[in-house]
Amino acid sequence: MRVYFRLGNRNLYPWLFLALAVGADTAVYLLLPQAKALELYLPVTAAVAGFVHFLYSQHHQETQLFVNLFEKFNARYDSLNEKLNAIVTRPAEDRLTPEETKALFDYFNLCAEEYLFFKSGYIDQDVWRSWLAGMKYFAQNTAVRSLWESELSSASYYGFNLALFNVVSSQVAPTR
């Protein structure tokens, strides 16, 4: 089972604490003699709090990593955005220049790295869907798609493939 990072999960931790604390204290009440149960409520609740705090801390660290990756990926995309838009708006019969090809290779690498971190669970699903919709937009250009398909045949893009665009084909997501 693959667990994906979700920014919104941080809202679940207070409810998780409440559910686990009530469950653990109820188990103590039902399973132990009354006198023993009274002296265990506080330690059991503290143990549950420690466990939930550990989970929340882990989520916080993953959020910090996500923010770092998000900023770096978006900065790299921003540096390519103008070139990519120029490529998709130029006449279709024009061949790609070496500069355009280099920009596309940089973009393909960026997309593959984003996919690698998404697949590893460090990119929020909603963010990935949005990025994927943007990738699909550029892949609709014949010259871009042809070069991308050719590059992907080398299997050097961390498992990224154009079939991933089928995931967003039925969804409405903003482009990058």
Image: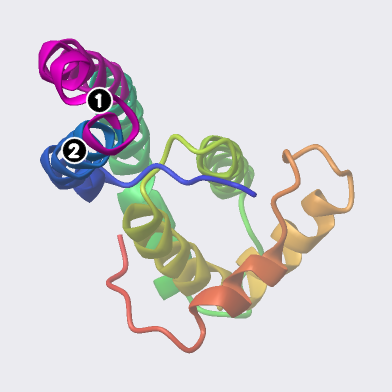
Confirm whether the magenta stretch covers residue 54.
yes
Disc 2 + disc 1, Cβ < 8 Å? yes
Q: Based on the displayed image, in which of its 4 quarters is residue 149 positioned?
A: bottom right
Quarter that holds the C terminus? bottom left
Residue at figure coordinates x 45%, y 73% from the top left: 137
Residue, far right: 154
Residue at figure coordinates x 50%, y 38% from the top left: 121
Residue 67 is situated, as x and y percent measured from the top left of the image, at 25, 29
What residue sits right under mark 2 in the picture? Answer: 13
Residue 29 is situated, as x and y percent measured from the top left of the image, at 21, 33
Counting residues from the N terminus, which is met first, the one under dot 2 or under dot 1? 2
Q: Is 27 in front, or is 115? A: 27
| Side of 69 where 38 appears, left or right | left
| Residue 49 drawn above or below residue 66 | above
Q: Is 159 in front, or is 48? A: 48
Q: Based on the displayed image, in which of its 4 quarters is residue 123 positioned?
A: top left
Confirm whether the magenta stretch covers residue 101.
no
One can see residue 124 in this view? yes
Residue at figure coordinates x 25%, y 25% from the top left: 52
Q: Which mark is residue 52?
A: 1
Q: Indicate the amino acid at tag 2.
A: Tyr
Residue 18 is situated, as x and y percent measured from the top left of the image, at 13, 40
SS at mark 1 in the image = helix
Q: Indicate the amino acid at tag 1.
A: Val
Highlighted magenta segment, given as a residue range: 28-55
SS at mark 2 in the image = helix
Disc 1 crowd, CA 10 A, few/some/many (<14, 14-19, 20+): many
One can see residue 141 in this view? no
Disc 2 crowd, CA 10 A, few/some/many (<14, 14-19, 20+): some
Q: Which mark is residue 20?
A: none
